[in-house]
Structure formats: structure tokens, C-alpha cells
Image: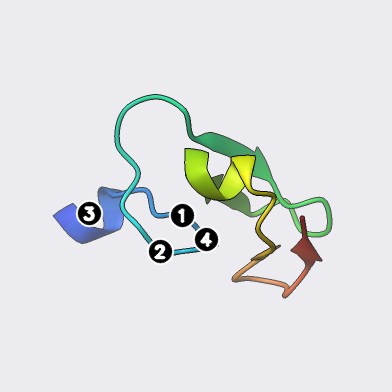
Amino acid sequence: MSAQQGRKRCVSCGVNIVGAGFTEFDCPECGHTINRCDKCRKQSNLYQCPDCGFTGP
């Protein structure tokens, strides 16, 4: 696995996620792991699953 593949990125804004405050959950449609940064999570920014296209708040 390359260093780039091991990094977690916010699916809403694309920033690298480091430290505490982020959330990680499974897509309700397909089960793909979704990562969201603290800022996007708190602002309820929309996210889209990169696998199935499901969109949520």
C-alpha cells in the first residue's frame, strides 16, 4: 500500500484527516467506508459515496 492510499480524506472537501474530531462510517447503501472531517461534519455539508453515489447530509 502506498503512503497516499493509507491516508484518510474527507469525502466532502478532500482534506487529509489527521487527529481527532473526524468521523468514519459505512455508506448506508453499499457499505463503503466514508470519512468526514470535523468541519464538514459540524456544518452538515453534503457527502457522496465514491462507490455508489449515495448522497447524505
Residue sitting farthest toward the bottom = 53
Q: Nearer the viewer, mark 1 or mark 3?
A: 1
Q: How far apart are marks 2 and 1 (CA)?
A: 5 Å
Q: In the rendered view of the protein, which quadrant contains the C terminus?
A: bottom right
**Would you name the residue on which mark 4 appears?**
11
Task: Look at the numbered disc 3 and give the secondary structure of its residue.
Answer: loop
Q: Nearer the viewer, mark 3 or mark 2?
A: 2
Query: Mark 3 and mark 4 in contact (Cβ < 8 Å)?
Result: no
Mark 2 and mark 4: span between their CA atoms? 6 Å
Q: Residue 14 carries which label?
A: 2
Q: Where is residue 29 in the image (x, y as percent from the top left)?
A: 83, 58
Q: What residue type is labelled 3?
A: Met
Label 1 crowd bin: few (<14), some (14–19), many (20+), radius 10 Å = many
> Is the C-beta separation of discs 1 and 4 under 8 Å?
yes
Mark 1 → mark 4, Cα distance in angstroms: 4 Å
Residue type beneath disc 4 = Val
- Residue at position x 69%, y 44% in the image: 26
Say few, some or many: other residues with alpha carbon within 10 Å of mark 2 (under 14 / 14 to 19 / 20 or more): few
Query: Which of the two discs, 1 and 3, labels the residue nearer the N terminus?
Result: 3
Left or right of residue 23: residue 8: left
Q: In this view, does 3 lie to the left or right of 40?
A: left
Location of mark 1 (residue): 10
Q: Do the residues labelled 2 and 4 touch (CB within 8 Å)?
A: yes
Closer to the camera, 45 or 53? 45
Amino acid, disc 1: Cys
Name the residue that disc number 3 marks: 1
Q: Quadrant of residue 25?
A: top right
Query: Which amino acid, mark 2?
Result: Gly
CB contact under 8 Å: marks 2 and 1? yes
Residue in the image at 50% along x and 38% along y: 38
